[in-house]
Image (cartoon, helix red, strand yellow):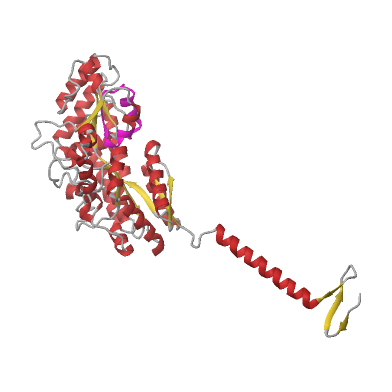
Amino acid sequence: MSSGRRGGIVSRIDMTGSTKSLAHQGRSAVNRTFRTAAFAAATLAFAAPLRAETEIQWWHAMTGGNNDVVVKLAEGFNASQKEFKVVPTYKGSYPDTMNAGIAAFRAGNAPHIIQVFEVGTATMMSAKGAVKPVFQLMKEAGEPFDPKSYLPAITGYYSTAQGDMLSFPFNSSSMVMWVNKDALKKAGLDGDKPPKTWPEVFDAAKKLKAAGYATCGFSNAWATWANVEQLSAWHNLPLSTKANGLDGFDTVLEFNGPLQVKHLQTLIDLQKDKTYDYSGRSNAGEGRFTSGECPLFLTSSGFYGNVKGNAKFEWSAVPMPYYPEAAGAPQNSIIGGASLWVMGGKSADEYKGVAKFFAYLSDTDRQAKLHQESGYLPITRAAYEATKATGFYKTNPSLETPLIELTNKEPTANSRGLRLGNMVQLRDVWSEEIEAALAGQKSAKDALDAAVTRGNAMLRQFERTVSR
């Protein structure tokens, strides 16, 4: 190869022996580079948004139809704007989800939102630094937020004594009695006038058993919620001191009074011939109602979707029974279900997304629709009033039953709710004692005395933990 200078223009001979102008080659290379860069830029602009969506991780414990509700809410919010994307993830049962969220926070990778059942409130409150209170979140994000617009019977459970909301109510419910009206008619009873008092329930259950319901006249899910927590509130009896823990962690259990003992002893006696039949600590036995096996069944009003979809008989949901000899009964019920807690350690932009999502959930029409389709309670006054205004409850009275229970009377220190530390473990201990009594191993008095004693020891342990 050789090269030389011709008239000031540099030339070269390439591998094939042809001669090219380096100046011309340089101009071509620049043009090719410019065209390539322009094409790449156009391609990137077309393929990706100018700003990536900020993901909001939401861990929850909803299954079946309720899981579908969660997914649809997230999809609806995501479609309503382009800044944020809520990603819902099922993490197991309520206790599993709460424990997973706390463990993730300690490991530095907590989700933004975690669904926690109502009895986990004290545990979440005591998790210092792990949560960001909702009232602070909404204020800092500049989102519209008026605590007075939410139903006080619901928000009071998740608020401080000053009324500041710590978590966002989501799937609130209360306990009702589900009634198989066809079964009552078969037993010679009026399906449109189900029993209102406990003595009436016991009598109806015996007649149902004689009419062919041999394995279960009546039952309940959530053993301690039904037979300890709701029973006490519904009869204006203390579960524990300090307003059931709402006024301080130094609370002492006292649900081993005469009426609670009487109730458990009656269940023990009726268990012997299956007039009453125990259905477990959680809600795993709820299918006994929809299958037709147990004609009277106490469980959450949130069971509505399953009953509506699976029961092959005429049914209704009515208020919990009460003992007529109890002065002032019935009082008011307490809420169940869960709320959404915001975890700490996130960026201002991420918190802005969470706040916008909560504002989206609070929309009146959305809340009314959610209530009417799922059976969970509307969290705002406006959604409740909007539902009433349409006449919805005239044709769907069962969905108003838990709201009637919650607002039956002005709450007292015994019926505002409960806030006990280590509540998941407490319920297990109480269930152990109830199960021992139902198995004939203890009297009702001995079982409830033991439940109180063992529970108080656990509360003192929790109190020492949070006071450190």
In-image side of 254 versus 440 (left or right): left
- Tell me what residue is drawn at x 28 percent, y 59 percent: 144
Q: Whole-percent x and y of residue 387?
A: 23, 41
Rendered view: 36 above or below 63: below
Point out the image quarter for the N terminus: bottom right
Q: Is 304 included in the stretch rendered in magenta? A: yes
User: Where, by quadrant of the figure, is residue 61 drawn?
Assistant: top left
Q: How many marks are shown on the rendered structure?
A: 0
201 to 451, vertically: above or below: above
- 77 sits to left or right of 206: right
Quadrant in which residue 439 is drawn: top left
Q: Is residue 327 left or right of residue 262?
A: left
In this view, the residue in front, 365 or 111, is 365
Q: Position of residue 195 (x, y in %)?
A: 17, 25
Residue range highlighted in magenta: 282-305
Q: Position of residue 350 (x, y in %)?
A: 41, 60
Q: Is residue 327 above or below residue 216?
A: below
| 74 within the magenta span | no
The part of the image, by quadrant, that contains residue 40 is: bottom right
Residue 437 visible to the viewer? yes
Q: Quadrant of the C terminus?
A: bottom left
Residue at 85% over, 85% down: 7
Left or right: residue 333 compared with residue 293: left
User: Who is closer to the viewer here, 2 or 154?
Assistant: 2
Q: Can residue 441 be spotted in the picture?
A: no
Q: Residue furthest front?
A: 7
The residue at the far bottom in this view is 8
**Observer-nearest residue: 248 or 100?**
100
Q: Position of residue 360 (x, y in %)?
A: 33, 52
